Image: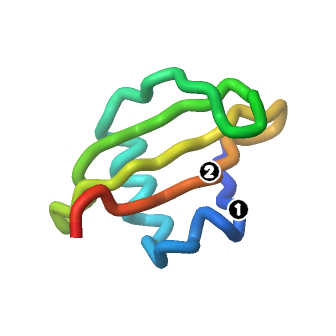
């Protein structure tokens, strides 16, 4: 499935590669997004060791990543 990133997912300036690393190495948890859509949430360390939270919504044609944020500074 194709993974796409919204502009707002880049708000914290975390690179797509770092988010994809977390998504590929951690199991997602089902959550409800702000819009009421079903979403998937990943929490894990990227390839640099930074703890990230990644949230994506499954769409018919792609997985749309709507949020990427570091959980520790």
Q: Position of residue 5 (x, y in %)?
A: 66, 60
Horizontal and vertical percent position of residue 13: 48, 78
* Residue 36 image position (x, y, % from top left): 75, 28
Quadrant of the rendered image containing residue 6:
bottom right
Left or right: 7 with respect to 9?
right
Q: Residue furthest toward the left?
A: 49
Residue under label 2, please give it.
65
- Residue at screen point 62% across, 30% down: 39
| Colour scheme of the rendered structure | rainbow
36 vs 9: above or below: above
Judging depth in this view, the residue of 58 and 37 nearest the camera is 37
Quarter placement of the N terminus:
top right
Answer above or below: position of 69 versus 65. Answer: below
Of the residues under marks 2 and 1, which one precedes in the sequence?
A: 1
Q: Residue at x 52, y 21 (%)?
A: 30
What kind of element bears circle 1?
loop
- Horizontal placement of 66 versus 59: left or right? left
Q: Residues within 10 Å of mark 2 (few under 14, many from 20)?
A: many
Rendered position, 67 above or below 8: above
Q: Are marks 2 and 1 in contact (CB under 8 Å)?
A: yes
How dense is the environment of label 1, judged by Cα within 10 Å: few (below 14), some, or many (20 and up)? few
The residue pinned by badge 1 equals 6
Residue depicted at 65% across the width and 35% down the height? 33
Depth check, front residue: 35 or 17? 35
């Amino acid at each position: 499935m194709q993974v796409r990133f919204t502009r707002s997912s880049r708000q914290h300036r975390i690179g797509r590669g770092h988010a994809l690393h977390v998504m590929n190495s951690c199991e997602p948890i089902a959550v409800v997004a702000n819009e009421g859509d079903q979403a998937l949430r990943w929490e894990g360390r990227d390839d640099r060791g930074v703890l990230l939270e990644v949230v994506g919504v499954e769409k018919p044609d792609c997985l749309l990543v709507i949020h990427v944020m570091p959980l520790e500074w």
